[in-house]
Image (cartoon, rainbow, N blue to C red):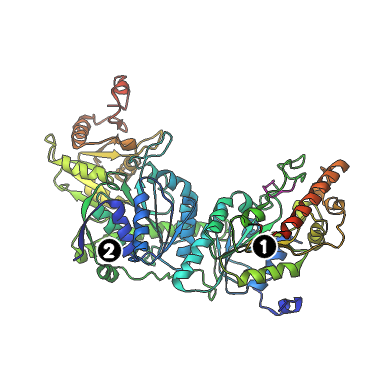
Amino acid sequence: MVLTIKDLMSRERTYLPGSASCPGCGASLAFKLASKVLGRNTVYVVPACCFSVIQGPYPKTCINAPLINIAFAAAAACASGITRAHKITGRKANVVVWAGDGGTVDIGLQALSGAAERNEDMIYVCYDNEAYMNTGIQRSGSTPQKAWTKTTLGGKVQPKKEVPLIVAMHRVPYVATASVGYPMDLVRKFEKASRMEGFRYIHILSPCPPGWGMSSNKTAEMGKLAVDTCFFPLYEIEHGKLRVTVKPRERKPLKNYLLAQSRFRRTLSEADVEELEKEVVKKWNQLLELEKLDRIV
Amino acid sequence: MGEWKLINANQAAAHAARLARAAVIPAYPITPQTTVVETIEEFIHEGIMDAEYIRVESEHSAMAAAIGASASGVRTFTATSSQGLLYMGEVVFWAAGSRLPIGMVIVDRAVGPPWNIHTDHQDAMSQRDSGWIQMFVSSAQEALDSVITMYKVAENPEVLLPFMVCIDAFILSHTYMPVNVPDQAEVDSFLPTYRPPHWMLDPDLPVDMGNLVMPMEDYMEMRWSIHTSMEKAKELLNQISREFAERFGRDHGGLVKAVDLEDADVAIVSLGTLSSEAEYALKRIDTAKTGLLKVRMFRPFPREEIIKLLKDKDVVVVLDRSISFGHSGPLAMEVRSALYGIDEAPKVVNFIVGLGGRDVTYKDIVSMVNFAIKVPEDEVFPCYWYGLKDRIRSLRLKGVI
């Protein structure tokens, strides 16, 4: 049975109106979609990230599900404690980490790797807005090459850390990338993940209007362009088997994506765009090669 | 009742976790705590303990997992030491702020650099203001009994704070002593199952725990509430320790334990195994009638007992196995401040001793007491390093004897 928008609309929402997110927040959109799939029987773990604020200040909250806020580096470990406690109490519920890219690929990577290696029964979600946005746009390990942030004024030198593949190398049952620009691909991945057991990892590209320098009505469009230019490919790795889930019929020029965002526009020369495009094509082809393998791990 | 076993304090701590029916145990090894986690592994492997054991990848994760488990409504135990406790520090505070009665054994060890695995209280002192109840013990039996007692204190709805039972590295952690290990039924009838009365991560009763609090909201009230619960823990510990003594026939004292203190003119005040050594020294001090006040609970601090039991003494000798650099020993600071403002308050003489596991014998304690008696009344804030090497002592510096 394939999930449709209509099915999703009719589901109970645990993400209530009145969140404290910025207008056009990609992470907020991602949570809205994911929480509809996950439903009410879900325990959320949130480390320091935009969602520490988005959930709303005490004594209010816009999340109608149990949620524990935890220190920056500690989300996957805290969720490990919850999922093990459920084994003792017999509770059956989704245990979901909802973390930003800083809390995932940088400061939280150790706890994430530990939980993945132990194959703890949880869904770990990284909503990736590609920088420390909650603290006001500083570079993270997930910031793409050449992107301007307040700590990379000339553009980031290093390329983005490939955390979904790093997690896959832990031999976990499920890893997926998703984008808010492809909502049905995203919800299907959550639906699949929630039916599985063990450590599941979903990495969502979440455009950030103030951090990326784009208007707040471009979130979905930018999330889509990232995929259509092959800048952020959508794939899943199920028990080691990689499958690219969205293949653009015709790859769009990368400049359509980059130049629509001031974080790139302010640092890029034409030569830079060309060079980045070469990298994108190379990585895309590598991914297609990986897809041909029986198992990548 | 119970069974006598020849075990060390680390094994005693593991037995305590088993008997308390701790159900989730996230732990990471560090010398000299390792045999706590190894013994728990043996218990689980042999099927005599029913617990989820999370072999985490760091102490930071150990405490974060303990928070997740405790917040899901199960009794949780872990243990660490020294660098491990420091690394865990951020989430140590988080556990107290979340009002989760997690139990932890700290095998007190020196902090580096340089590396030193021997006993020292600097690690525990670093977490003094974390909101954890801190208890120091001086035998393997007391370690076992205190963990069980402290769960009952910590889980009381008026307390709901985590606790650490601090045992001295090697002197307790690796020294075998006869220990009476109680029967499961005895412990079960003393310590009820943990049922969180406040909040837990329950989809039927969703609570958002720990979200942002603005200055005009309840942050300060939450801090006040932790402080108030700490005060409540003092009352409860005395009461629950008496209950424990009646049931199990072993009395380790409550917040403090006094030995020959009533008609003494001089009092020795100390934590952990320095107290056992001091107790042995008492009979060998012939210069003044000397008693001992062993401080068991360091946080909350038993200031009422300190005032009541020490106010009439002439000299109070405080032995500190840690140092607040640039000031004095942490225990001496607390004792001095408790006695401040009392008419004819005793002279408080502080000794910094035994750092990094340097041996402190009863002979040393006798000579410190004899020295303290001779410290002039008008000397301001006497604080001495005792036991430094001759090359430093020969410099005849202030504050070194």
Q: Of helix, strand and loop, which one carries label 2?
A: helix
Where does residue B67 sit, x and y in percent of width and height? 47, 60
Would you place residue B120 above or below residue A293 in this image?
Answer: above
Residue B235: horizontal and vertical position, in percent?
Answer: 30, 60
Type of amino acid at the residue the image marks with label 1 = Lys
- Magenta residues span A138-144
Q: Which image quarter is the C terminus of chain B in?
A: top left
The label on residue A241 is 1
- Viewer-closest of A119 and B65: A119
Q: Which of B154 and B391 is in front in this view?
A: B391
From the image, state whether disc 1 or disc 2 is nearer to you.
Answer: 1
User: Pointer 1 indicates a residue of which chain?
Assistant: A
Left or right: where does residue A188 sit relative to residue B51? right
The residue identified by callout 2 is: B240
Magenta stretch: dominant secondary structure:
loop
Observer-nearest of A174 and A82: A174
Whole-percent x, y for residue B221 in the image? 49, 59
Measured in 3D between alpha carbons, the distance from the residue under mark 1 to the one under mark 2, in whole angstroms, is 58 Å
Q: Which circle marks residue A115 in the picture?
A: none
The location of residue B284, given as percent across then percent down, is 13, 37
Badge 1 marks a residue whose secondary structure is strand
Residue at position x 79%, y 49% in the image: A282
For mark 1, does the 10 Å Cα neighbourhood hold few (<14), some (14 to 19), or many (20 or more) residues?
some
Asked if residue B346 lies left or right of residue B109, the reply is left
